[in-house]
Image: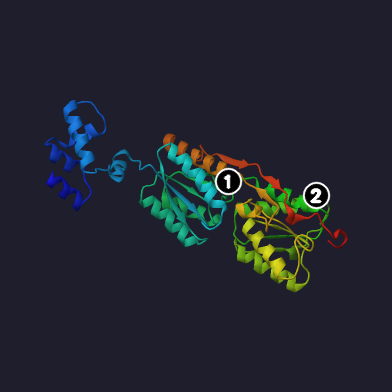
Amino acid sequence: MGQIAEVHNIAAVTIKDIAREANVSYATVSRALNNKRGVREATRQKVLKLATEMSYTPNAIARGLVKKQTHTLGLIIPDITNPFYPEVARGIEDGAAEEGFSIFLCNTNWERERELEYLKLLAEKRADGIILAPIDNEVETAESRLTGKMPIVYVSNAPVGTLHSFVVIDNVLGGFLATEHLIRSGYRKIGFVGSTEDSLTIAERLKGYRKALEKYGITIDERHIQLGEFKQESGYRIMRKMISDGDYPRAIFAENDLLALGILQGVKAGGLSVPEDVAVVGFDDIPFASFPGVQLTTINQPTYEMGRKAVNILLGQIQGSDGNLAAQSQQIYLKPRLIVRQSSGPSIRVSNH
Protein backbone atom coordinates (compact mmCIF):
# COMPACT_ATOMS: atom_id res chain seq x y z
CA MET A 1 0.00 0.00 0.00
CA GLY A 2 3.06 2.29 0.03
CA GLN A 3 2.53 2.99 -3.64
CA ILE A 4 -1.08 4.02 -2.95
CA ALA A 5 0.01 6.56 -0.36
CA GLU A 6 2.56 7.96 -2.79
CA VAL A 7 -0.10 8.47 -5.49
CA HIS A 8 -2.42 10.21 -3.03
CA ASN A 9 0.30 12.57 -1.80
CA ILE A 10 1.48 13.63 -5.26
CA ALA A 11 -1.82 14.53 -6.92
CA ALA A 12 -5.55 13.96 -6.98
CA VAL A 13 -6.36 10.29 -7.46
CA THR A 14 -7.92 9.32 -10.80
CA ILE A 15 -9.65 6.15 -12.02
CA LYS A 16 -6.42 5.36 -13.85
CA ASP A 17 -4.62 5.17 -10.49
CA ILE A 18 -7.30 2.87 -9.11
CA ALA A 19 -7.21 0.70 -12.25
CA ARG A 20 -3.46 0.32 -11.94
CA GLU A 21 -3.70 -0.75 -8.28
CA ALA A 22 -6.60 -3.14 -8.96
CA ASN A 23 -4.96 -4.49 -12.13
CA VAL A 24 -8.14 -3.96 -14.14
CA SER A 25 -9.15 -1.70 -17.05
CA TYR A 26 -10.26 1.92 -16.73
CA ALA A 27 -13.70 0.92 -18.02
CA THR A 28 -14.06 -1.69 -15.26
CA VAL A 29 -13.25 0.88 -12.59
CA SER A 30 -15.74 3.34 -14.09
CA ARG A 31 -18.49 0.72 -14.18
CA ALA A 32 -17.76 -0.35 -10.61
CA LEU A 33 -17.79 3.21 -9.26
CA ASN A 34 -21.02 4.02 -11.08
CA ASN A 35 -22.69 0.74 -10.08
CA LYS A 36 -23.06 -0.39 -13.67
CA ARG A 37 -23.46 -3.97 -14.86
CA GLY A 38 -20.64 -6.09 -16.30
CA VAL A 39 -18.42 -6.18 -13.20
CA ARG A 40 -17.96 -9.20 -10.94
CA GLU A 41 -18.99 -8.47 -7.36
CA ALA A 42 -15.55 -9.32 -5.99
CA THR A 43 -13.96 -6.89 -8.45
CA ARG A 44 -16.51 -4.19 -7.61
CA GLN A 45 -15.79 -4.50 -3.88
CA LYS A 46 -12.06 -4.39 -4.53
CA VAL A 47 -12.40 -1.22 -6.59
CA LEU A 48 -14.66 0.45 -4.03
CA LYS A 49 -12.24 -0.46 -1.21
CA LEU A 50 -9.28 0.98 -3.12
CA ALA A 51 -11.26 4.15 -3.95
CA THR A 52 -11.91 4.71 -0.26
CA GLU A 53 -8.34 3.98 0.79
CA MET A 54 -6.96 6.28 -1.90
CA SER A 55 -9.41 9.10 -1.06
CA TYR A 56 -10.73 9.14 -4.61
CA THR A 57 -13.02 12.05 -5.50
CA PRO A 58 -14.91 12.06 -8.83
CA ASN A 59 -13.76 14.75 -11.25
CA ALA A 60 -16.93 16.81 -11.65
CA ILE A 61 -15.43 18.97 -14.40
CA ALA A 62 -14.41 16.02 -16.56
CA ARG A 63 -17.74 14.34 -16.00
CA GLY A 64 -19.51 17.57 -16.89
CA LEU A 65 -17.67 17.80 -20.20
CA VAL A 66 -18.83 14.29 -21.09
CA LYS A 67 -22.44 14.88 -20.04
CA LYS A 68 -22.44 18.54 -21.19
CA GLN A 69 -23.63 19.53 -17.73
CA THR A 70 -21.57 20.65 -14.73
CA HIS A 71 -24.37 20.84 -12.16
CA THR A 72 -23.26 24.33 -11.22
CA LEU A 73 -25.29 27.54 -11.37
CA GLY A 74 -24.00 31.10 -11.31
CA LEU A 75 -25.58 33.64 -8.98
CA ILE A 76 -24.64 37.27 -9.63
CA ILE A 77 -25.76 39.88 -7.11
CA PRO A 78 -24.84 43.58 -6.80
CA ASP A 79 -24.22 43.92 -3.07
CA ILE A 80 -23.50 41.05 -0.67
CA THR A 81 -23.51 43.54 2.24
CA ASN A 82 -27.19 44.34 1.65
CA PRO A 83 -29.13 41.98 3.98
CA PHE A 84 -31.80 41.57 1.30
CA TYR A 85 -29.64 39.44 -0.99
CA PRO A 86 -28.41 36.69 1.40
CA GLU A 87 -32.01 35.60 2.01
CA VAL A 88 -32.67 35.46 -1.74
CA ALA A 89 -29.43 33.50 -2.11
CA ARG A 90 -30.52 31.05 0.61
CA GLY A 91 -33.71 30.27 -1.29
CA ILE A 92 -31.70 29.75 -4.48
CA GLU A 93 -29.12 27.53 -2.78
CA ASP A 94 -31.73 25.37 -1.05
CA GLY A 95 -33.61 24.82 -4.30
CA ALA A 96 -30.42 24.06 -6.21
CA ALA A 97 -29.11 21.62 -3.59
CA GLU A 98 -32.31 19.59 -3.72
CA GLU A 99 -31.59 18.90 -7.40
CA GLY A 100 -27.87 18.25 -6.93
CA PHE A 101 -26.64 21.64 -8.17
CA SER A 102 -23.99 23.86 -6.58
CA ILE A 103 -23.93 27.67 -6.57
CA PHE A 104 -21.06 29.86 -7.75
CA LEU A 105 -21.66 33.23 -6.01
CA CYS A 106 -20.47 36.48 -7.63
CA ASN A 107 -20.70 39.96 -6.07
CA THR A 108 -20.48 42.91 -8.49
CA ASN A 109 -20.43 45.75 -5.93
CA TRP A 110 -22.66 47.71 -8.32
CA GLU A 111 -19.90 47.77 -10.95
CA ARG A 112 -21.02 47.12 -14.53
CA GLU A 113 -17.62 45.91 -15.75
CA ARG A 114 -17.45 43.36 -12.97
CA GLU A 115 -20.97 42.17 -13.83
CA LEU A 116 -19.94 41.58 -17.44
CA GLU A 117 -16.73 39.87 -16.36
CA TYR A 118 -18.69 37.44 -14.20
CA LEU A 119 -21.06 36.63 -17.07
CA LYS A 120 -18.07 35.81 -19.24
CA LEU A 121 -16.39 33.81 -16.47
CA LEU A 122 -19.47 31.69 -15.79
CA ALA A 123 -19.77 30.91 -19.49
CA GLU A 124 -16.11 29.89 -19.59
CA LYS A 125 -16.61 27.71 -16.50
CA ARG A 126 -19.51 26.03 -18.31
CA ALA A 127 -22.12 26.83 -15.67
CA ASP A 128 -25.44 25.28 -16.61
CA GLY A 129 -27.33 28.53 -16.05
CA ILE A 130 -27.24 31.92 -14.35
CA ILE A 131 -29.47 33.75 -11.89
CA LEU A 132 -28.76 37.45 -12.09
CA ALA A 133 -29.84 40.46 -10.05
CA PRO A 134 -28.81 43.04 -12.67
CA ILE A 135 -27.51 46.49 -11.91
CA ASP A 136 -29.51 48.12 -14.71
CA ASN A 137 -30.77 47.70 -18.27
CA GLU A 138 -27.30 47.67 -19.83
CA VAL A 139 -26.70 43.98 -19.15
CA GLU A 140 -29.34 43.01 -21.71
CA THR A 141 -27.21 44.33 -24.58
CA ALA A 142 -24.19 42.23 -23.61
CA GLU A 143 -25.34 39.04 -21.91
CA SER A 144 -26.24 37.07 -25.06
CA ARG A 145 -22.87 37.94 -26.61
CA LEU A 146 -21.06 36.76 -23.48
CA THR A 147 -23.11 33.70 -22.57
CA GLY A 148 -24.64 32.50 -25.86
CA LYS A 149 -27.76 30.39 -25.29
CA MET A 150 -27.08 29.76 -21.61
CA PRO A 151 -30.36 29.97 -19.65
CA ILE A 152 -30.64 33.14 -17.54
CA VAL A 153 -33.26 34.11 -14.98
CA TYR A 154 -33.36 37.59 -13.47
CA VAL A 155 -34.22 37.95 -9.79
CA SER A 156 -35.26 41.00 -7.74
CA ASN A 157 -34.70 43.28 -10.73
CA ALA A 158 -34.92 42.91 -14.49
CA PRO A 159 -34.08 44.98 -17.59
CA VAL A 160 -37.10 46.73 -19.04
CA GLY A 161 -38.61 44.72 -21.91
CA THR A 162 -36.50 41.61 -21.36
CA LEU A 163 -37.58 38.30 -22.92
CA HIS A 164 -35.82 36.31 -20.21
CA SER A 165 -37.68 34.89 -17.24
CA PHE A 166 -37.66 36.92 -14.05
CA VAL A 167 -39.02 36.84 -10.51
CA VAL A 168 -39.58 40.26 -8.95
CA ILE A 169 -41.90 41.96 -6.51
CA ASP A 170 -44.83 43.99 -7.84
CA ASN A 171 -42.87 47.21 -7.46
CA VAL A 172 -45.64 49.50 -8.68
CA LEU A 173 -48.03 48.16 -6.05
CA GLY A 174 -45.30 48.31 -3.39
CA GLY A 175 -44.51 51.92 -4.19
CA PHE A 176 -48.20 52.76 -4.16
CA LEU A 177 -48.81 51.07 -0.78
CA ALA A 178 -45.83 52.83 0.82
CA THR A 179 -46.89 56.28 -0.41
CA GLU A 180 -50.58 55.73 0.29
CA HIS A 181 -49.75 54.79 3.87
CA LEU A 182 -47.97 58.13 4.36
CA ILE A 183 -50.91 60.00 2.82
CA ARG A 184 -53.40 58.22 5.08
CA SER A 185 -51.18 59.05 8.06
CA GLY A 186 -51.76 62.73 7.31
CA TYR A 187 -48.68 63.68 5.29
CA ARG A 188 -48.91 65.76 2.12
CA LYS A 189 -45.34 66.91 1.51
CA ILE A 190 -43.94 63.49 0.55
CA GLY A 191 -40.60 62.91 -1.11
CA PHE A 192 -38.97 59.97 -2.88
CA VAL A 193 -35.33 58.91 -2.52
CA GLY A 194 -33.97 56.30 -4.91
CA SER A 195 -31.03 55.31 -7.08
CA THR A 196 -29.92 56.64 -10.43
CA GLU A 197 -29.68 53.16 -11.96
CA ASP A 198 -31.84 52.66 -15.03
CA SER A 199 -33.81 49.55 -14.17
CA LEU A 200 -37.25 48.07 -13.72
CA THR A 201 -37.06 48.43 -9.94
CA ILE A 202 -36.49 52.19 -9.76
CA ALA A 203 -38.91 52.93 -12.60
CA GLU A 204 -41.76 50.92 -11.10
CA ARG A 205 -41.36 52.01 -7.46
CA LEU A 206 -41.27 55.62 -8.58
CA LYS A 207 -44.32 54.96 -10.73
CA GLY A 208 -46.18 53.61 -7.68
CA TYR A 209 -45.20 56.72 -5.70
CA ARG A 210 -46.51 59.04 -8.41
CA LYS A 211 -49.67 56.98 -8.84
CA ALA A 212 -50.57 57.30 -5.15
CA LEU A 213 -50.02 61.07 -5.07
CA GLU A 214 -52.10 61.52 -8.22
CA LYS A 215 -54.93 59.36 -6.85
CA TYR A 216 -55.20 61.54 -3.73
CA GLY A 217 -54.88 64.81 -5.63
CA ILE A 218 -51.48 65.77 -4.20
CA THR A 219 -49.19 67.85 -6.39
CA ILE A 220 -45.88 66.13 -7.16
CA ASP A 221 -42.92 68.35 -6.31
CA GLU A 222 -40.04 67.18 -8.52
CA ARG A 223 -37.55 68.86 -6.17
CA HIS A 224 -38.42 66.23 -3.58
CA ILE A 225 -37.54 63.33 -5.88
CA GLN A 226 -33.85 62.77 -5.17
CA LEU A 227 -31.69 60.04 -6.72
CA GLY A 228 -28.25 58.79 -5.71
CA GLU A 229 -26.56 55.45 -5.10
CA PHE A 230 -28.35 52.35 -3.90
CA LYS A 231 -26.57 52.50 -0.50
CA GLN A 232 -27.08 53.70 3.06
CA GLU A 233 -24.48 56.47 2.73
CA SER A 234 -26.38 57.94 -0.20
CA GLY A 235 -29.60 58.20 1.82
CA TYR A 236 -27.70 59.98 4.58
CA ARG A 237 -26.11 62.52 2.22
CA ILE A 238 -29.38 63.25 0.40
CA MET A 239 -31.28 63.80 3.67
CA ARG A 240 -28.62 66.08 5.14
CA LYS A 241 -28.63 68.20 1.97
CA MET A 242 -32.42 68.49 1.92
CA ILE A 243 -32.43 69.61 5.55
CA SER A 244 -29.63 72.13 4.98
CA ASP A 245 -31.51 73.52 1.97
CA GLY A 246 -34.48 74.14 4.31
CA ASP A 247 -37.26 72.90 2.04
CA TYR A 248 -37.27 69.24 3.02
CA PRO A 249 -40.28 66.88 2.64
CA ARG A 250 -42.05 65.89 5.86
CA ALA A 251 -42.32 62.26 4.78
CA ILE A 252 -40.09 60.16 2.53
CA PHE A 253 -40.56 56.90 0.69
CA ALA A 254 -37.12 55.33 0.15
CA GLU A 255 -36.52 52.88 -2.69
CA ASN A 256 -34.91 50.36 -0.34
CA ASP A 257 -34.28 49.87 3.37
CA LEU A 258 -30.58 50.73 3.23
CA LEU A 259 -31.42 54.14 1.78
CA ALA A 260 -34.13 54.48 4.44
CA LEU A 261 -31.64 53.72 7.24
CA GLY A 262 -29.35 56.40 5.84
CA ILE A 263 -32.28 58.83 5.78
CA LEU A 264 -33.09 58.06 9.44
CA GLN A 265 -29.48 58.84 10.36
CA GLY A 266 -29.56 62.02 8.27
CA VAL A 267 -32.74 63.23 9.98
CA LYS A 268 -31.26 62.74 13.44
CA ALA A 269 -27.90 64.26 12.45
CA GLY A 270 -29.83 67.30 11.21
CA GLY A 271 -31.33 67.83 14.64
CA LEU A 272 -34.80 66.54 13.70
CA SER A 273 -36.91 63.62 14.92
CA VAL A 274 -38.57 60.61 13.29
CA PRO A 275 -41.53 60.59 12.78
CA GLU A 276 -42.37 63.93 14.44
CA ASP A 277 -40.46 65.99 11.87
CA VAL A 278 -39.87 63.49 9.05
CA ALA A 279 -41.64 60.15 8.54
CA VAL A 280 -39.81 57.42 6.64
CA VAL A 281 -40.95 54.31 4.79
CA GLY A 282 -38.51 51.84 3.20
CA PHE A 283 -38.75 48.82 0.93
CA ASP A 284 -37.48 45.22 1.48
CA ASP A 285 -38.07 44.59 5.22
CA ILE A 286 -34.47 43.58 5.92
CA PRO A 287 -33.76 42.32 9.50
CA PHE A 288 -32.44 45.71 10.64
CA ALA A 289 -35.83 47.29 9.93
CA SER A 290 -37.41 45.70 13.00
CA PHE A 291 -34.58 46.50 15.45
CA PRO A 292 -35.76 48.43 18.54
CA GLY A 293 -33.74 51.54 17.66
CA VAL A 294 -34.96 51.58 14.07
CA GLN A 295 -38.58 50.38 13.84
CA LEU A 296 -38.79 51.18 10.13
CA THR A 297 -42.11 50.99 8.31
CA THR A 298 -41.39 49.17 5.09
CA ILE A 299 -42.64 47.01 2.24
CA ASN A 300 -42.00 43.33 2.82
CA GLN A 301 -40.69 41.17 0.00
CA PRO A 302 -40.90 37.35 0.22
CA THR A 303 -37.16 37.09 -0.43
CA TYR A 304 -36.71 33.37 0.23
CA GLU A 305 -39.69 32.52 -1.98
CA MET A 306 -38.25 34.80 -4.66
CA GLY A 307 -35.03 32.81 -4.68
CA ARG A 308 -36.79 29.45 -4.74
CA LYS A 309 -39.02 30.42 -7.64
CA ALA A 310 -36.07 31.81 -9.63
CA VAL A 311 -33.99 28.64 -9.27
CA ASN A 312 -36.98 26.41 -10.05
CA ILE A 313 -37.56 28.27 -13.31
CA LEU A 314 -33.87 28.06 -14.21
CA LEU A 315 -33.63 24.33 -13.46
CA GLY A 316 -36.74 23.74 -15.55
CA GLN A 317 -35.08 25.49 -18.49
CA ILE A 318 -31.85 23.55 -18.03
CA GLN A 319 -33.51 20.16 -17.76
CA GLY A 320 -36.08 20.68 -20.50
CA SER A 321 -34.71 23.40 -22.76
CA ASP A 322 -35.38 23.16 -26.48
CA GLY A 323 -33.29 26.26 -27.18
CA ASN A 324 -36.28 28.61 -27.45
CA LEU A 325 -35.88 30.58 -24.24
CA ALA A 326 -38.38 33.28 -25.20
CA ALA A 327 -41.14 30.68 -25.55
CA GLN A 328 -40.33 29.37 -22.05
CA SER A 329 -40.20 32.79 -20.44
CA GLN A 330 -41.93 33.10 -17.08
CA GLN A 331 -42.31 36.58 -15.66
CA ILE A 332 -43.50 36.39 -12.08
CA TYR A 333 -44.58 39.32 -9.90
CA LEU A 334 -44.82 38.51 -6.18
CA LYS A 335 -47.19 40.43 -3.94
CA PRO A 336 -45.72 43.06 -1.56
CA ARG A 337 -46.96 43.60 1.99
CA LEU A 338 -46.92 46.82 4.04
CA ILE A 339 -45.32 46.45 7.49
CA VAL A 340 -46.19 49.43 9.71
CA ARG A 341 -43.76 50.42 12.47
CA GLN A 342 -42.91 53.61 14.35
CA SER A 343 -40.98 55.50 11.64
CA SER A 344 -44.09 56.55 9.73
CA GLY A 345 -46.21 58.35 12.27
CA PRO A 346 -49.05 59.06 12.20
CA SER A 347 -48.18 62.70 11.52
CA ILE A 348 -47.93 64.83 14.66
CA ARG A 349 -48.10 68.17 12.88
CA VAL A 350 -50.59 67.42 10.10
CA SER A 351 -51.35 71.04 9.33
CA ASN A 352 -47.68 71.75 8.55
CA HIS A 353 -47.05 68.55 6.56
Q: Secondary structure at mark 2?
A: helix
Which residue is drawn at the image coordinates 22% and 35% (left, top)? 48
Along the viewing direction, whichever of 297 and 65 lies nearer the viewer = 297
Q: Residues within 10 Å of mark 1 (few under 14, many from 20)?
A: many
Q: Which residue is mark 1?
A: 303
The number of callouts visible is 2
Q: Position of residue 259 (x, y in %)?
A: 64, 60
Q: Is residue 221 left or right of residue 258?
A: right
Q: Is residue 94 left or right of residue 46?
A: right
Instruction: Select label 2 or label 1 by which is in front.
Output: 1
Separation of residues labelled 2 and 1 (CA atoms): 29 Å
Which residue is drawn at the image coordinates 47% and 62% (left, top)? 113
Color encoding of the figure: rainbow
Q: Residue furthest bottom?
A: 244
Residue 58 image-quadrant placement: top left
Residue 238 image-quadrant placement: bottom right
Q: Is residue 243 above or below residue 210?
A: below
Q: Position of residue 199 (x, y in %)?
A: 59, 55
Q: Quadrant of the N terminus?
A: top left
Q: Residue furthest right?
A: 351
Q: Which residue is mark 2?
A: 215
Q: Of callouts 2 and 1, which one flags the residue occurring earlier in the amino acid sequence?
A: 2
Along the viewing direction, whichever of 188 and 295 lies nearer the viewer = 295
